[in-house]
Image: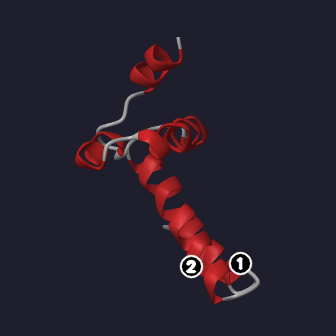
Amino acid sequence: MRPIGVDRCNWLFAGSDTGGETLARAMTLIESSKMNALDPQAYLADLLDRIHDHKVSQLDKLLPWNWTAAAAQDRAA
């Protein structure tokens, strides 16, 4: 909870309301990945790489609690 409280002050300087909303979404993904014991950088890199051609009906596979680093490495190989 501390990172969210500290970042809340930083969101005031995101540039605009839209910038603050974008930053809040990014922090949600980062904190969700941390809560699921994932490396946030690896998770976000794989998520951003896969999301553009991923089927909408299978988006649940990209959620942090369903994502595994091993599956991401197998996909990259």
- Of 8 and 68, which appears nearest the observer? 68
Q: Position of residue 1 (x, y in %)?
A: 48, 67
Amino acid under disc 2: Glu
Asked if residue 46 lies left or right of residue 23, the reply is left
Q: Is residue 69 above or below residue 45?
A: above
**17 with respect to 61 (left or right):** right
| Residue 61 location, quadrant | top left
Judging from the image, what secondary structure is the residue with disc 2 in? helix
Above/below status of 18 relative to 69: below
Q: Amino acid at mark 1?
A: Asn
Q: Position of residue 31 (x, y in %)?
A: 48, 57
**Residue at x-position 48% and y-position 37%:** 50
Residue count near mark 1 (Cα–Cα under 10 Å), binned few <14, some 14–19, many ≥20: few
**x then y, percent, for residue 38:** 46, 38
- Few, some or many C-alpha atoms within 10 Å of disc 2 (few <14, some 14-19, many ≥20)? few
**Where is residue 5 shown, x and y percent of the image?**
57, 76
The dot on residue 29 is none
Residue at the spot 61% in from the left edge and 70% down from the top edge: 23
List the residue tagged with mark 1: 10
* Precedes in sequence: disc 1 or disc 2: 1
Name the residue rendered at 30%, 50% in the picture: 56
Q: Where 21 falls versus 44 (above or below)?
A: below
Mark seen at residue 21: 2
